[in-house]
Image (spheres, helix red, strand yellow):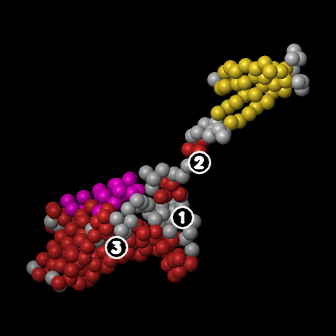
Amino acid sequence: AVSNRIGTSLSLIRPSTVSVESSTKRRNNKPTISIISQHPQARYEFALQESNNNNNNDQTTPSNNQSSFAKYGRPQDIDSNTFGPLLPIAEAVDEATGGWGLTYADLHPATPRTTVGQAFLATNFFYAAAGLWLGFHGDWFYGGLTELAGIVSFVYHYTQLEFGKNRTEVRLALLIDYFCAGSALLTGGVYMIQAGITTVPLDAVVSAAVAVVCLSLCWVWEFGYPYIFWHSLWHIASAYTGYLVGQEHLANIAA
């Protein structure tokens, strides 16, 4: 059997008995076999064209080195079965971001059972450490929000690692993560405004800038290991920023 598909084109001028005389040549850079009959006006010509082995490449699945939004476009599974009472909010986020807001990175081949996946999940414990420190030093409100953000972030990334691409369970966890992380970030921003932007410690400003850069790079390389690397740094830098802002807030209250 021939491994490649062969397309055959037949050019017939006049039917006739085919002779044994044949020739092989190239026409338009393609192999051609001509079988010529005894009749001077009759000729059968078979052009054998070897198929391109790479034809299937035009229809392959999108590259893994792309974000889910670039690969699969706008989510088509935002419905009440998954989001329940949160559906209007999910639809609003989806509409406001043109479908990007509820897409997420495919972290394959990492899973919750691989070393890389477990190390990534472990970076959420920086939020736990910061939240506990703030709580035990008197700010259970901000400390509690930081703790909650870390817990929900852990759940979101666990489902992201476990279920993979285009799953409504992961989109729901992502939406809740927006709420919790946003609440902690908003509270930290209020603390900074209350203290006066000029009095915010320089290390908090630098840490916040590093966190923003890392988060931005997650969206540049929103796939696999590059995303895990940059998002891990976002967890660490943002947790440290929250700790510094909360520490400054407690110091201002004590003063």
Of the pair 120 and 32, the residue shown nearer to us = 32
**Which image quadrant: the C terminus?**
bottom left
Task: Give the farthest residue toward the front.
Answer: 20
Q: Is residue 217 above or below residue 148?
A: above
Q: Residue at x 78, y 18 (%)?
A: 21
Quarter-of-image position of residue 117: bottom left
Mark pair 1, 3: CA separation? 23 Å
- Asked whether 221 falls inside the magenta stretch, the response is yes
Earlier sequence position, callout 1 versus callout 2: 2
Residue at which label 1 appears: 75
Q: Specify few, some or many for label 1: CA neighbours under 10 Å numbering under 14, 14-19, or 20 or more.
A: some
List x then y, in percent, for residue 5: 66, 39
Earlier sequence position, callout 1 versus callout 3: 1
Earlier sequence position, callout 3 versus callout 2: 2
Q: Is residue 56 above or below residue 163?
A: above
Pair 1/2: label in front: 2
Mark pair 1, 2: CA separation? 21 Å
Question: Which mark, by number, is residue 154?
Answer: 3
Q: Residue at x 54, y 61 (%)?
A: 74
Q: Amino acid at mark 3?
A: Phe
Q: Amino acid at mark 1?
A: Pro
Q: Residue at x 56, y 78 (%)?
A: 81
Q: Is residue 135 left or right of residue 18?
A: left
Q: Which residues are magenta?
A: 206-232
Q: Secondary structure at mark 2?
A: helix
Pair 3/2: label in front: 2
